[in-house]
Amino acid sequence: MQDVELEYIPKMNNGLFIACFEGWGNALDISMGMAQFLIKELGAEYLGKLTTDPFYVMKERRPVIEVVEGNLRKLKPPGCELYIVDKTRVGRDIIVLKGEEPDIQWFRFADSILSLCRVAGVKTVVSCGGMLDNTHYTDTMLSVVASNQEIIDSLPIENPSLIDYAGQSSIHSTLHYEAKKREFGCIGFYCHCPAYLQGITHFGLLAYLGKLLSRWAGFELNTDELSTAWINVKKQIQEAIEQNPELRSFVNEIKKNRGKAKLEPHKRDDKIINLEDYLNF
């Protein structure tokens, strides 16, 4: 398990590994928001981290420091942290990865993670994310990619949206590809996020994803906090739409074309309105 620094080596039964990355696939904070919520709600404990130096270009992703009255208090380099939940708490052994998408050596990164999964007794690798799309802000659209049809058939939803895509990928795809080669079960859940909602966390999609993930994987997860947060955020979105005719026209047009969203990454243009100009969170 090169490049993995652990407090201890866990021994799990039918373990679940959930990877959540900042970077590509973190539209509207879906990936990192899910990691943070799982860690908090499930009472996950710190397990360890991935070594920083092999995977990040420091000149591009500089460490963050804290200086108080000339005294250097903290230095936090980029990286990924690992948290663990015991099945006695929620009904399933779970490891959650929370961190930044690595810049380089993706296959070495995947190998380090999957070596840990093998030793720890993980059976299934999951990734969670969000992608920008032309969807209505109240929609709960989600697409999946899985290692086999059996996993797809096990999902608690009828006719799941399956990804058809050819193009540039991310660490998610590398991790899944290598996991499948090693005969892990693997699946990725990706929420379709409205592209005109920039700079916010879409708690509605997080609640939907959390319910689906926990139901499918067989662990307990209360998403009431997310649902309540979404009620408040949605109210502000609705008010912003009512106050801006251009935005209202744009969103109404999307509403008319529901169900026609495409997987291709959304390309921003002059018609896209950044809701950060209207919302106050």
Image (cartoon, rainbow, N blue to C red):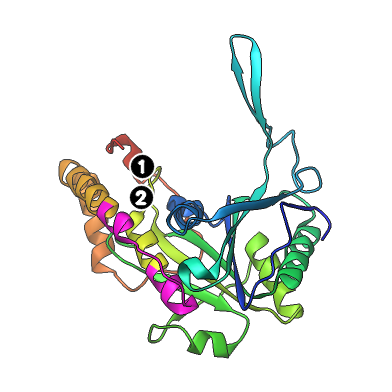
The residue drawn where x is 47% and y is 53% is 27
Q: Is residue 47 left or right of residue 25?
A: right
Residue 150 visible? The answer is yes
Looking at numbered disc 1 in the image, what kind of residue is underneath it?
Answer: Asn
Residue at the extreme front: 88
Between 32 and 262, the residue placed more toward the observer is: 32
- The residue segment tinted magenta is 211-228
In the image, residue 262 sits, relative to residue 235, either above or below, namely: below
Between 58 and 118, the residue placed more toward the observer is: 118
Percent x, y for residue 203?
34, 55
What SS does tag 1 mark? loop
What SS does tag 2 mark? loop
Question: Mark 1 — residue?
Answer: 274
Q: Is residue 171 magenta?
A: no
Looking at numbered disc 2 in the image, what kind of residue is underneath it?
Answer: Tyr
**Residue 250: which numbered mark, if any?**
none
The residue drawn where x is 45% and y is 52% is 40
Residue 263 visible? The answer is no
In the image, residue 70 sits, relative to residue 262, either above or below, namely: above
